[in-house]
Amino acid sequence: MALSAGNLNIGDTYEECLVEDLKRTQLVQYSGASGDYNPLHTDEIFTTQVAGYPSVFAHGMLSMGMTGRMLTNYVGDGRLKTFGVRFTNQVWPGDTLHSTATVEEVAVEDGDSVVKLKVETTNQDGKMVVSGYASARVDP
Amino acid sequence: MAIDRFPVEASHIMMFARSVADANPIYYDEEYAAGTEPGKMIAPPTFAQSSAQFDPDYFLRPKIGEPWFGSGKEATGIKRDGSGGGGGGGLHAEQHFEYHRHISPGDVLTATVKPGKTWERESKRAGKLTFSETVTEYRDQNGELVITARGVGVRTERPVDQ
């Protein structure tokens, strides 16, 4: 089910729902797995009373990690060559995120066929939360 | 800052994949993984970030016997200076990965971290923003470069307006 350069067209898209109604418990789960225990992601009292935010919010890397899942589901296992993002808005408990990869270019690099993708993850209000790019090896 | 030993382990990969809600069996089922193109379990694309677990000085992990800035009896256990808005030591602005090879259980990585550029910008939503870049190079047990990661952190003058 690997992608193949011959079947890819500029503007092709692939999309997935990353999460519906994000739960605080998932932020706890990500903290534990990643080792990033910043209280901003799990400690409502610290985050509202000391840091001055309306509630805990997601690690940028959780949004990037879920966006990465959309990418690997699209391009296949072990095929990514690059993946980079900017975190453009915070993600909050209760958010529902959708992520889209759009084909921007199909090229040959060092003898490999490579697809270049624009990567965008938005919340339920259509606000962009993750904006970036990826490239992946595809079959010729 | 450097990480001397980051052993890539199957159960860590499984827990990490669960936390990003990725049900792909290549992250937990060795037998399934043997039949995939990589031919073995690999780590999800952003897994290298969990090298923080193996950084002895990582400042966002509570350390035994040391004060911690999260809440307990009080809303914070420690007063921090100069962290700017947001209190937690800043926010993550960008992250970039370049994969030279996909890592697997059994790999034992080292990581070196180099500071990159720093720059400032004014923003309407959070006042003065101070950006700083770090470049982390992950090498395997043979000294081969496997992942290059570039992160950009930002300290805000005040919490980001919502």
Image (cartoon, helix red, strand yellow):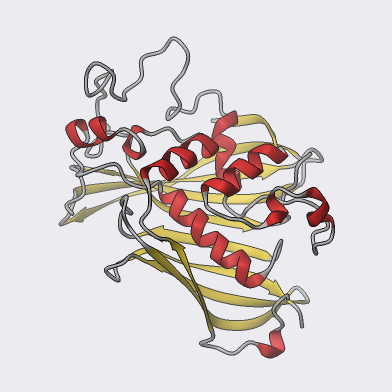
Q: Quadrant of residue B75?
A: top left
Left of B106 or right of it: where is B111?
left
Point out the image quarter for the N terminus of chain A: bottom right
Give the percent coordinates (x, y) of residue A25: 41, 41
Give the percent coordinates (x, y) of residue B79: 24, 20
Residue that lies at the very extreme toward the top in this rendered image: B65
Left of A5 or right of it: where is A47?
left
Give the percent coordinates (x, y) of residue A30: 48, 42
Left of B105 or right of it: where is A9?
left
Point out the image quarter for the C terminus of chain A: bottom right
Q: Quadrant of residue A48?
A: top left
Give the percent coordinates (x, y) of residue A115: 63, 77
Task: Give the residue at x 38% y 48%.
Answer: A23
Residue A80 in sight: yes
Q: Viewer-proximal residue, B57 or A76?
A: A76
Task: Give the residue at x 73% y 55%.
Answer: B101
Task: Give the residue at x 67% y 50%.
Answer: B43
Q: Quadrant of residue A21?
A: bottom left
Residue B136 in sight: no
Q: Is residue B78 above or below residue B65?
A: below
Task: Give the residue at x 30% y 58%.
Answer: A89
